Image (cartoon, grey):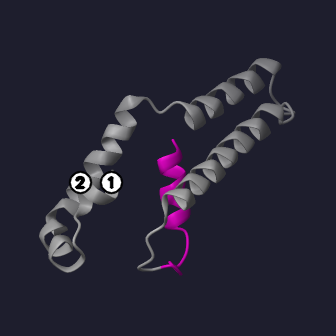
Amino acid sequence: MLLEYAISLATSGHNLNSGVIPSIEEIDEIRKQLSKIKFNVGFYELSADSPGSGTEFDHWLKIRIMKDSLHARGDGYHSHIVELYNETFAPHNDFLRHYYGFDSNDILV
């Protein structure tokens, strides 16, 4: 799921753009870049050499597991992320509305 990649990348370093809200065009560009990362990692795993100590079936099984973990989290995974997001940020909605004019639901949409 691209949201997981976005969260991983966003939390991997210091936020140099604190207070900057990206435009729709920038969000679309971020989504495209994350899609490329997902595709390239999947392609790399698909084209990797067979393990020296394993069989061709072992290699095929590894590829299937990697592909499934990269491309299919299921509908429940997104619901889980939304639930965690709401549990984390909903308690701050009054503060966000008072000082910034929006709440956590506006960010999630």
Residue 87 position in % (x across, y down):
21, 55
Residue 12 position in % (x across, y down):
55, 68
Image: 21 above or below 32? below
Q: On the rendered structure, is 63 left or right of 6?
A: right
Which residue is label 2 attached to? Answer: 86
Residue 77, image quadrant: top left
The three-letter code of the residue at mark 1 reads: Leu
Q: Residue at x 83, y 36 (%)?
A: 48
The three-letter code of the residue at mark 2 reads: Asn
Along the viewing direction, whichever of 102 and 10 lies nearer the viewer: 102
Residue 55, image quadrant: top right
Image: 4 above or below 94? above
Q: On the rendered structure, is 63 left or right of 93?
A: right
Give the label, 2 or 1, closer to the camera. Answer: 1
Q: Residue at x 58, y 56 (%)?
A: 30
Q: Which residues are magenta?
A: 1-17
**Structural crowding at the residue carrying mark 1, measured as other residues with C-alpha within 10 Å and reported as few (<14), some (14–19) or many (≥20):** few
Which residue is label 1 attached to? Answer: 108
